[in-house]
Amino acid sequence: MGKIVITENVSLDGIAGGERLLAWVGQIRGEAARVLLDEALGAEALLLGRRSYEFFAARWPSRSGEHADRLNSMPKYVVSSSLDNPDWNASVLTGDVVSEASKLKRELAGDIVVYGSIQLARTLIQHDLADELRLMIYPVVIGEGEGLFCGTSDTRPMRLISARGTGDGLAFLTYQPVRGA
């Protein structure tokens, strides 16, 4: 059985999307880059929304190195009703998101990693399909943008399973949902 892992870059004030955060994300180096490489090496597949897929597919195929090689070769599943004939080793999931994600969890054995894809991440959390949240917290207050948990209708207790910082001020927090709480 697969495990859905949502990995998000988040500002101190909880913003997970927008150009202002992307400027900080582009500065990933050192230990932070190693964390992301280790995650990619340990993943079975990526699960992405259409916009995140298009963002990554426009950037990664031309890159080289261990991280790029892994992302480029890994199977990708894209939730979309409008994407036709994707490249970059991707398949489109056009059915109900909850059903399709549940099916992937049954069919795949390893980590199914969700990068970006805030709307998809919210849906997976809302329907209790996310098995782990990995948050890379950037030392910046953005002030405006899209929050990862905005619009969540229920309280979702989480258990902190690891926390560590880097010399450049990033914090990596990993949470698991507390089920049955």
Image: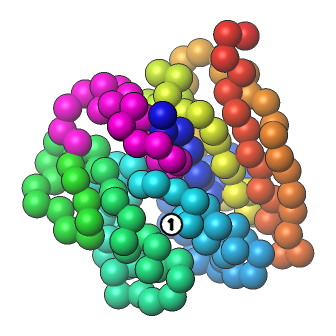
Residue 42 percent coordinates (x, y): 58, 60
Q: Is residue 63 found left or right of 9 in the rendered image?
A: left
Seen in the picture, residue 178 relative to 18 is either above or below; the reply is above
* Range of magenta residues: 93-122
Residue kind at label 1, given as amino acid type: Glu
Residue 18 percent coordinates (x, y): 50, 59
- At 59% from the left and 34% from the top, the residue drawn is 131
User: Is label 1 in a helix, a strand or a loop?
Assistant: helix
Residue 121 in view: no
- At 83% from the left and 46% from the top, the residue drawn is 162
Seen in the picture, residue 134 relative to 39 is either above or below; the reply is above
Q: Is residue 150 found left or right of 178 in the rendered image?
A: left
Location of mark 1 (residue): 19
Residue 129 percent coordinates (x, y): 49, 28
Magenta segment includes 98: yes
Q: Quadrant of residue 22?
A: bottom right
- At 42% from the left and 87% from the top, the residue drawn is 63
- At label 1, counting other C-alpha atoms closer than 10 Å, the crowd grade (few under 14, some 14-19, many 20 or more) is few
- At 77% from the left and 56% from the top, the residue drawn is 172
